[in-house]
Amino acid sequence: MSLKLTDIVKRFKTETVLDGVSLSVGRGETLVLFGPSGAGKTVLLRLIAGVVDPDGGTIEIEGRDMDGVEPEDRGIGMAFQNFALFPHMDAMANIASPLTARRTGREAIAETVGKVARMLKIDHVLHHKPKELSNGQKQRTALARALAGAPQILLLDDPLRNVDAKLRFEMRLELPRLLRSQDATVIYVTQDYKEAMALGDRIAVMNGHGIQQIGTPEDIYLRPANIEIARLFGDPVINLLDVVPEAADGSGGVQVRLSDQPVALVGGYAGTVGTDCVLGLRPEAMRFVDPGTPGAIPVEVEAETPLNEKTVTLTLTQRGREIMVSRPSGMPGPDQGTAYVAVDAKDALLFDRATGQRIAPGAHSPALQEDVA
């Protein structure tokens, strides 16, 4: 089923939690709601489910306005953070409850519950009651219940939050396959950017009472709408350096300076020359190079941290600005003293320093002052 929200407003007393939120989700699509705690993600799910009513705007499912439609009549499956398991039922009965309500046959129930329970690795606790389950097992039981009903719209509120790291990684691989097989329209809430990128066909980044950006995982990571989103996606965090672009001598292009060395910007930023900007460089978009390499930027190595699959090096520019450089684990690199780095200019991002908004190539930014990078 398709889902469409238009200008949704929700207030609690004098606090506005959601202000003019609009989005649409296509049939069979998984949309991830991503953002910090308090951004309104769970409230938005509850509005869609019909648990609470909006103070403004419309919610449509398959083109039908949900105003006045009860939760049980919306064809929605839910798994919320508070589990909401029936305490007097064992895990199997909890998972089977949507099937039992539809009077599904006993054999079909056993087959469906067993399949979902094995996938979520809770088949060994099916006869335990909620009070006997760990929080992680409760969370997976609530998720299994939502999946077992094969709803046309599935609302998942951070369903892997209490799951251990190994199973969480496995579920990032398994869940997309299961969701595709059910052809459900899915709204998935998480605060884990890796989970958002792994599970979402699209990601809606929420903050400040609304949605700041909607796009594919690639769009969000490579073309974040603003500095705030750029910081939320990536580990280690993106390097952000105050710069003022300048015209490159003789080439007609635009450049910025790091350690007094010119770094060319790719894509046509002529409108930003002489304005206050912020240069965004992902740590993996930088690499150590030999002295004398064209475009090499001198830095001082401060510290090195191995992080399993990668090694992160903290460096300082000649003006004392911190730059983190990431390289695959096992790849050689300097661990002290003077070193040189090169920038993959095509991956550089430019933001308006005053507003924090990303400047698209060819656009103009209205700031002004001196370069302090």
Image (cartoon, rainbow, N blue to C red):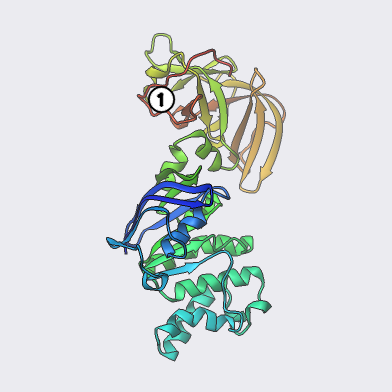
Most extreme residue toward the top is: 250
- The image shows residue 363, relative to residue 46, as above or below, that is above
Residue depicted at x 66% and y 34%: 313
Per the image, label 1 sits on a secondary structure element best described as loop
Residue depicted at x 55% and y 52%: 191
For the C terminus, give its image quadrant.
top right
- The image shows residue 24, relative to residue 76, as above or below, that is above
Give the image location of residue 57, x and y in percent.
Answer: 36, 52
Give the image location of residue 181, x and y in percent.
Answer: 38, 69
Give the image location of residue 120, x and y in percent.
Answer: 54, 71
Which residue is labeled 1 in the image?
266
Q: Could one spot residue 167 in this view of the protein?
A: yes
Residue type at mark 1 is Val
Most extreme residue toward the bottom is: 106
Q: Nearer the viewer, residue 171 or 193?
A: 193
Residue depicted at x 56% and y 74%: 141
Give the image location of residue 271, x and y in percent.
Answer: 38, 18
- The image shows residue 146, relative to residue 157, as above or below, that is below
Crowd class of label 1 (few under 14; some 14 to 19; many from 20; radius 10 Å) = some
Most extreme residue toward the front is: 13
Horizontal side of residue 186 vs 232, given as left or right: left
- The image shows residue 62, relative to residue 333, as above or below, that is below
For the N terminus, give its image quadrant.
bottom left
